[in-house]
Amino acid sequence: MFVLIICLLVSTAAYAQLPPSAKVLPPGFVGAETNLGGTMLIEATKPNENFPKPHSDQGIKLQITWQKQPAADMILDMLAKQPEEPAGRITGSATREEPCGIKPYRDGVLLCRKVLTPWIGAGRFPDLVTWRITWTGKGSGGLFTVEINNFFGAKETATGWIDELIPKITNPK
């Protein structure tokens, strides 16, 4: 019984570290929260606008995570100093990724990957270019991560969403 009470208290404390999705998600995103004890997770999706035909839109994936992490400063330092992964193919796919920057950003680290998916099928169409942009920063006794994946458009738009989310999740009111 004592263990059950402790688990409930820890999970309640972790839940308070990330605001409800309705308070933080950018317009158009639909998502839900998951409490995994020491980790809180918001997963959301939204269709891409002006997605090129004939490629199939898998939708923009947005994931916000808070994880209890007493060594957040050390982890951020390691993230900032690590070299970018080189360009390469995604296993089992014709899709390839290219690095597009890793840098200190808004009291955290911003990592960018350009994802290129070739057209496979009848006719000739240009490669589909989407972005995977991840920000990791600290707050509330842990690490926050915001990842935007499969975004079609200007990477500055996706970075702008991250800019809007950072104060909402690190300084909730």
Image (cartoon, helix red, strand yellow):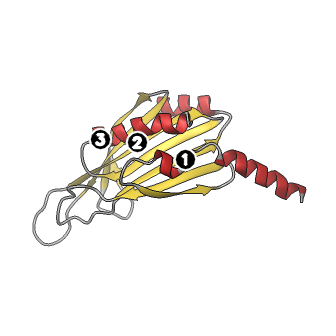
Residue 166, position as x, y percentages in the image: 47, 36
Residue that mark 1 sits on: 65
56, 76: nearer the viewer: 56
* Separation of marks 3 and 2 at Cα, in angstroms: 23 Å
Q: Amino acid at mark 1?
A: Thr
**Three-letter code for the amino acid on which mark 2 is drawn:** Glu
The quarter of the picture where residue 58 lies is bottom left
Task: Report the side of 135 relative to 76 (left or right).
Answer: left
Q: Which of disc 1 and disc 2 is earlier in sequence?
A: 1
Circle 2/circle 1 CB separation < 8 Å: no
Is 32 left or right of 123, judged from the image as shown? right
Q: Quick check: can you spot residue 77?
A: yes
Residue at 41% x, 29% y is 103
Q: Residue at x 82, y 51 (%)?
A: 6
- Residue at the disc numbered 3: 157
| Disc number for residue 151 | none
User: Is 34 located above or below residue 157 in the figure?
Assistant: below
Which part of the image, by quadrant, shows the N terminus? Answer: bottom right
Disc number lying in front (3 or 2): 3
Residue matched to label 2:
85
Q: Secondary structure at mark 2?
A: loop
- Quarter of the image with the C terminus is top right
Amino acid type, callout 3 = Thr
**Element marked by disc 1:** strand
